[in-house]
Amino acid sequence: MAERGGQGAFLRGLFVPVYLPAILFATGEGALIPVVPLTATALGANLAVAGIISGLLMIGVVIGDIPSSAVVARWGEEVAMRVAGVLAALAAVVCWAAPNLVVLAAGVLVVGIASATFNLARHSFLTTWTPTAYRARAMSLLGGTSRVGYFVGPFLAAPVIALWGSHSVYWLHVAACAAVLVALQVMPDPKTVLQLSLIHISEPTRLALI
């Protein structure tokens, strides 16, 4: 029972420095899901082409895993997440200003690549710094953050579309990326939070985790 309490306290301590930036990033990405096909259609795409361009978001995630792993290995998780935030924001602006389907497709693809980089960096951080006994739950919760973002994002996009049009949603994604960058800058260092969380775990449990 004490171990469960320690695990709960440890995971709650991860919410602000680890899970909250992931939720913000996924929310911005989720807001784009209903908008990309609308933009493609407005630029002259038929239903099939609009579907392909929308699918480039996930294709970017797949092909972005290899270069993103090199970025994380070379510069570390924190730098990789900041690079991903800037890259995703710039790609959203490209999508907003896209004059044709090719530019739109390129922007959507880069958003997916940035998402792969950000998510891989978060996974790498948790794998490195979370005790083995807590790792499965920590990683499972991290996977849940993307689901939360994909659920919340379209709901946030709806009033933006109603008030300012579907094209304005790209700026919602830019705002989400900016919020991620601010959060990474001002929030407590996740490594320090993890170390402090372990201090409050009972001595036998802490020794078992080492």
Image (tube, rainbow, N blue to C red):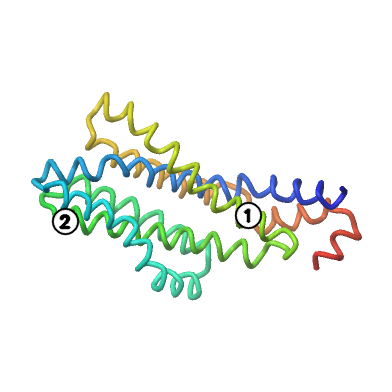
**Residue at image mark 2:** 103
Few, some or many residues within 10 Å of mark 1 (<14, 14–19, 20+): few
Q: How many marks?
A: 2
Residue in front for this viewpoint, 125 or 109: 109
> Among all residues in the image, which is located at the extreme left?
44
> Among all residues in the image, which is located at the extreme top?
163
> Among all residues in the image, which is located at the extreme right?
204
Image coords of residue 99 (percent x, y) = 11, 49
Which mark is first along the chain, 1 or 2?
A: 2
Q: Secondary structure at mark 2?
A: helix
Residue in front for this viewpoint, 55 or 159: 55
Q: If the image is split into quadrants, where does the C terminus sit?
A: bottom right
Residue lying at 38% horizontally and 44% vertically, measured from the top left:
30
Image coords of residue 151 (percent x, y) = 44, 39
Residue lying at 22% horizontally and 55% vertically, measured from the top left:
52
Q: Secondary structure at mark 1?
A: loop
Left or right: 13 as drawn, with respect to 162 = right
Q: Amino acid at mark 1?
A: Asp
Left or right: 46 as drawn, with respect to 13 = left
Looking at the image, is 74 positioned above or below residue 59?
below
Image coords of residue 8 (percent x, y) = 75, 46
Q: Amino acid at mark 2?
A: Val
**Residue at image mark 1:** 189
Looking at the image, is 102 positioned above or below residue 74?
above
